Image (tube, rainbow, N blue to C red):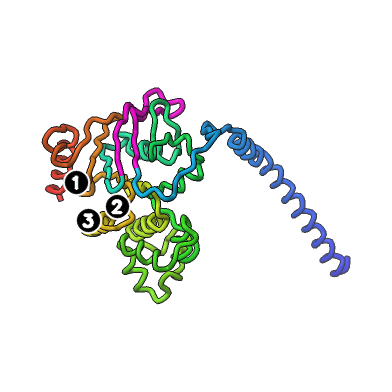
Amino acid sequence: MQVGNLIAFMSYAMQILMSFMMLSMVFVFIPRAQASAKRIQTVFALKSTMKPAEHPVALDPNVKQHTLSFDHVDYRYRQAEMPALSDIDFKASSGQTVAIIGGTGSGKTTLVSLIPRFYDVDKGEIELDGHNINDFSMKDLRNQVSFVPQKATLFTGSIRDNMKYGNPNATDDEIWHALEIARAKDFVEEDPAGLDLQVEQGGDNFSGGQKQRLAIARALVKKSAVYVFDDSFSALDFKTDADLRAALRADEHIQQSITVIVAQRIATVADADLILVLDNGKLVGKGTHDELRANNKVYQEIIHSQLREEDDK
């Protein structure tokens, strides 16, 4: 056999073998794809349990004084035996800060997740400005709530793009003002790019504390009736935490809004107008720091446990 014929034979044989290998890989991946498709189809087939309002109530954008109330609210996760929240009852109005504290699994995040209707209550009512939140359209309700989770999420793009996520019409001056309140202005200003500073995927080019402050600033740019900070100060040192909360209280727009803070540290909640103490989904105390420190056993235990931790350090 001539050399040319041998090389041609080997090339054709290799192509045929590669084709069979690819075909065998396809047969291997087909069952996997079918299993994945079934799981995806299960999600697509789910029917939403959130019922939209048939005749939505329009929110008045000119309202300067807001109210938020929980009227004996119960909530239980589907297929759970025990309720996550039982008989939650409190009221707040513009300018007030409501702090929520309790042990792990006490229902703090569940409680604040009910405000923007991530879940619907099983019993009782939640009212915003005197209307049941179920009477608002989802869009209108969530436009009035700025929610900052503990794990800050930043998007690929510039700082400016991230800040405008909730308010596309925000000006640079408004963005800088929000960054200043959130104690993020300094490290953004230090970079020559300023607001054009690029954010890597997931915000990996920022520390945990910086990401939390940027997420807080983004919420402030949105200008909402209710601000929810779900343990959003956990990565901040005590001084930055205190400075940020003082700046929030001093801001003119925040004074016309309601602030809800979920926290683990007593120092973060101590200056709140109303502190809610949760234990196993139940509201076991509400009042100011001084009132709860004097009369509430669960709150006293939290204080003592944190003091012991400080002593151990």
Residues packed near mark 3 inside 10 Å, few (<14), some (14 to 19) or many (20 plus): some
Q: Is residue 292 left or right of residue 100?
A: left
Image position of 243 with respect to 131: above or below: below
Q: Earlier in the sequence, mark 2 or mark 1?
A: 2
Q: Who is closer to the viewer here, 309 or 194?
A: 194
N-terminal-most mark, 3 or 2 = 3
Q: Of helix, strand and loop, which one carries label 3?
A: helix
Q: Is residue 8 left or right of residue 56?
A: right
Q: Which residue is mark 2?
A: 255
Could you say which is closer to the camera, residue 264 or residue 139? 139
* Mark 2 closeness class: few <14, some 14–19, many ≥20 residues within 10 Å: some
Which amino acid type is shown beneath numbered disc 3?
Answer: Ala
Please rate how many residues cluster around mark 1, counting C-alpha atoms within 10 Å: few if below 14, some from 14 to 19, many from 20: some
Q: Quadrant of residue 242?
A: bottom left
Please name the residue shown 34% across and 33% down the image: 70
Disc nearer the start of the sequence (1/3): 3
Q: CA distance from mark 2 to mark 1?
A: 18 Å
Q: Position of residue 69 (x, y in %)?
A: 34, 36
* The label number, if any, that marks residue 242 in the structure image: 3
On the image, the x and y values in percent for residue 107 come to 33, 35
CB atoms of marks 3 and 2 within 8 Å: no
The mark closer to the camera, 3 or 2, is: 2
Residue 38 visible to the viewer: yes
Magenta part of the protein: which range?
67-93
Q: Residue at x 40, y 27 (%)?
A: 76
Secondary structure category for the residue under label 2: helix
What percent of the width, then of the height, locates residue 252? 30, 57
Q: Is residue 122 above or below residue 166?
A: above
